[in-house]
Image (spheres, rainbow, N blue to C red):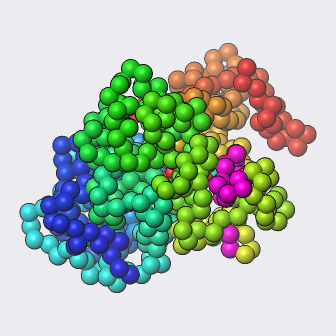
Amino acid sequence: MTSLFPALTNAPANRPALRFGDRSLTYAELATATGLLAGSLGDAGRVAVWATPTLETAVAVVAAMRAGVPAVPLNPKSGEKELGHILSDSAPSLVLATPGDELPAAIRDLPRIDVTPDTTATATATSPAEETATDDDPALVVYTSGTTGPPKGAVISRRAIASTLDALADAWQWTGEDVLVHGLPLFHVHGLVLGILGPLRRGGSVRHLGRFSTQGVTRELSEGATMLFGVPTMYHRIAQSLAEEPELAKALGRARLLVSGSAALPVHDHERITAATGRRVIERYGMTETLMNTSVRADGEARAGTVGVPLPGVDLRLVEEDGAPITSYDGETVGEIQVRGPNLFTEYLNRPDATAAAFTADGWFRTGDMAVRESDGYVRIVGRKATDLIKSGGYKIGAGEIENALLEHPGVREAAVTGEPDADLGERIVAWIVPADPQSPPTAEELADHVARRLAPHKRPRVVHHLDALPRNDMGKIMKRSLSHD
Ligand code: MCA
Ligand code: AMP
C-alpha cells in the first residue's frame, strides 16, 4: 500500500512534525530518525513499545509502521499482572524504550532497543518494507478491557488507521496546516492514533503536553495550535478553571476545533465552555475495535449531547434486542449501535471465540453502546449494554478484572465492583467487599494500592464499602443493581 505518512517525503523538510516540551522533530528529522530505527527492526515479528508520553514513543511507533512490524503500546504504569498477561499474549520479540527508563522485571528479559532519535545521519526517507506492506497487515495491537477476564489485544490494520484518519480529515477539514495540542496517554487509540498518527498523516504537527494541564492548553493555543483533543475529564477541568484563568478562555476562543471523545461530555460542561469562549466542543464517537465511527462535522451543527453522524465509509445501524434493525429516526427508539467499514479491527489476538462473538452473523460489529438517532441522522448515545464496563477518566475498565484482582488480596473474601457517577471522571470505581476478617478489614488505600500494583493505577477503586455479605439471587449471582451507594 502507499505510505501511511506521505508527508515524511512530501512535506517541506523544516516543517515541524512533533514537539514534546522543548524537544521537537521536523519532518526531515522524523523521516531520518524513523528510517534508521525501522531499518534496525528488520522482521522483528511484533515489538512492544514502552509508551511513555515522549518523543521516543512517537518515533518508535512510526518506525515500527515504516518497518511493517506491528507495535504493541504498553501502559508504562501497568502492574505486574496486566503486563504479564499482555506480554505473554502478544509475545513481542523486543521492546522499544526511552533511554534511561527503568523497565519492570516482567519485561526486562526482552531484548531492548533504546530509541535515540538520530537526525544527523542520512537515512532513506522511504522504507522498502513500507512499500511492500499491504492494507491488511497489522499495524498495532492495542489492549482493551472487557467485562470479564484480562484485556484483549485488538489487532488494528494499516487500512483501518488510514481510513479512520482520512475520514476524520473529511469531517474536520483537518489539514497539514493544523497544529494539534493534546496531553493524552500514548498507549490507547485516542492519544496515539488520533493524536500522533493523525497529524503526521496530514503533514501537520502535534505538540504533546507531557501531561494534561489547563496552563499547557492555554500556552499552546495562544502560540499557534489550532486543535485540541481531550477526554471529557479534561474538558470538565477546563470548564472548572475558566473562571480563574481568563487566558484559558481567550486561548480556547482562538482554536479552530475543540474535540472531545472516549466518553460522553456532559451538556453542562459543553455549555460552560461555550458560554465562556464562544466555541462549541464537538464530539466524536469511537472504540479501540472500530477506531472512529461518528463525529459532529466541522461544517455541521455542533449539537451538545450528540456524537454527530457516521463518518464517510462507516455503515452504522441501531438494532433491537432481537437483532431487528431500527429504521425510524425518531430520537426515541433505543437500540444497540452496530458498525461495518474499513475502520474496523481485524480480530482479538489469540481469541477467535471473542472475535466471533463480537460480530453478528452478517458481519456487523456489536459495539455494546445504546443510542437513538435524531430525525436528521445525528446519533445520541444513551448508555451501554453491559453494566460491568466502567468508563473512568475516558479509560474503559472491566469490573470483572478488578474483582479478580481484589479477590487475590488475602483480606478479601468476596468482591463486587460497580461504577458510580463522578463529576470529574464521568464514573468512579466502587469496590464492595466482604472482608476475610471482619475485625480487621483491609483499608481502602491498601486495596487501591493493591489494584494499582496488579493492574494499573487508573483501575484502582476510589471508594470501598465493607459488607457482611454480597446480595445474591437464588442462583448465587451477585445482584449489583441492589448495591446501593448510600
Ligand atoms: C494515585 N496514583 C497512584 C495511586 N493513586 N499510583 C499508584 N498507586 C496508587 N494507589 C497516581 C496516578 O498514577 C497518577 O500519576 C496520579 O496519582 C493521579 O492519578 P489520577 O487522579 O487517577 O489521575 P488524573 O491525573 O486525575 O487523570 C485524569 C486524566 C486521565 C488525566 C484525565 O484519566 C487520562 O489521561 N485519561 C485519558 C484516558 C484515555 O486516553 N482514554 C482513551 C481510551 P501521574 O500523575 O504520575 O500520572 S478510549 C479510546 O481510545 C477510544 C478509541 C476513544 O473513543 O477515544
Ligand atoms: P475503548 O474501548 O476504551 O476504546 O472505549 C470505547 C467506548 O468509549 C465506546 O464503546 C463508548 O462507550 C465510549 N465512547 C467513546 N467516545 C464517546 C463519546 N463521544 N460519547 C460517549 N461515549 C463514547
Compared across the picture, whether 118 is left or right of 366 comes to left
Which residue range is magenta in the image? 363-384
What count of labels does the image hold? 0
Foreground of the two, 282 or 435: 282
Q: Position of residue 71 (x, y in %)?
A: 39, 64
Is 96 situated above or below 135?
above
Compared across the picture, whether 179 is left or right of 352 comes to left
Whether 121 is among the magenta residues is no
The residue located at (69%, 29%) in the rendering is: 432
Q: Position of residue 270 (x, y in %)?
A: 54, 36
Q: Position of residue 461 (x, y in %)?
A: 57, 31
Compared across the picture, whether 4 is left or right of 148 comes to left
Magenta-highlighted stretch: main secondary structure?
strand
Foreground of the two, 76 or 219: 219
For the N terminus, the quadrant is bottom left
Whether 364 is among the magenta residues is yes
Is 155 situated above or below 145?
below
In the figure, residue 217 lies in which quadrant?
Answer: top left
